[in-house]
Amino acid sequence: MDRTTATFKRQISIAAPASRVWRALCDPGEVAQWDAGVRFPIDPPVDYPQPGQRVRWRTTGRVFRILLDEPVEVVPERRLRANLSLGPARYDETYTIRTAVDESAISAGHCLLLMVVTLSIASVPGRRIAFRHFSADTPTSMVSALTSIKSHCEALGA
């Protein structure tokens, strides 16, 4: 077992349709509104996100200031998966949107947003120390992101 890789899962119910949540996840201007870890996209393509693209984000961090975002799977209003790099941290991040069509326990006009993040650390000196830092921070960051997406989507509506 690799001691510098870990997978985390979190989910949240959102009182907004999948189309609204999808827009919040994919519109760079909206991402900058709800994601406390980024300030703005540096070079987003007009048709972001598409597999194979690369987008740089200016972060709010003091040490690592650029986040590299590479979408690898885009299924509109269903799934967004991207590889992210921040300093030595590598994230395989997947958002999956589930609706009443998927699960009868979800009310119409609502959705469930599932976030799965696999963290790994690049081979660098101090790899295990970096892993402890990033793996301790990742679950908290995920809850913060999901809570912010929920607030953002519910405040703005469809």
Image: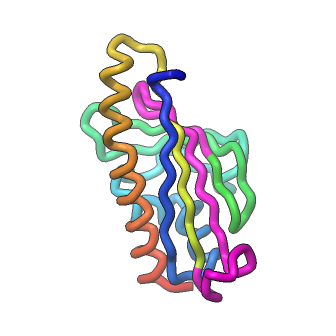
Which percent across, then down, holds residue 8? 48, 46
Q: Is residue 107 left or right of residue 5?
A: right
Which percent across, then down, holds residue 11? 50, 63
Which percent across, then down, holds residue 13? 50, 74
* Residue 109 within the magenta-colored segment of the rendering: yes
Q: Is residue 61 left or right of residue 114?
A: left
The N terminus lies in which quarter of the figure? top right
Residue found at the far left of this picture: 62
Please indicate, yes or no, whether residue 76 appears anywhere in the rendered image.
yes
* Residue 121 within the magenta-colored segment of the rendering: no
Q: Name which residue lies at 44% across and 63% down.
A: 146
Q: Name which residue lies at 51% across and 22% down.
A: 2
Question: Considering only vertical position in the picture, is 8 above or below 114?
Answer: above
Which percent across, then down, holds residue 119? 49, 35
Q: Name which residue lies at 74% across and 79% down.
A: 101
Asked which quadrant contains residue 20, the reply is bottom right
> The magenta stretch spans which residues?
82-110
Please indicate, yes or no, whether residue 29 appears anywhere in the rendered image.
no
Question: Considering only vertical position in the picture, is 70 above or below 130?
Answer: below
Q: Nearer the viewer, residue 102 or 158?
A: 102
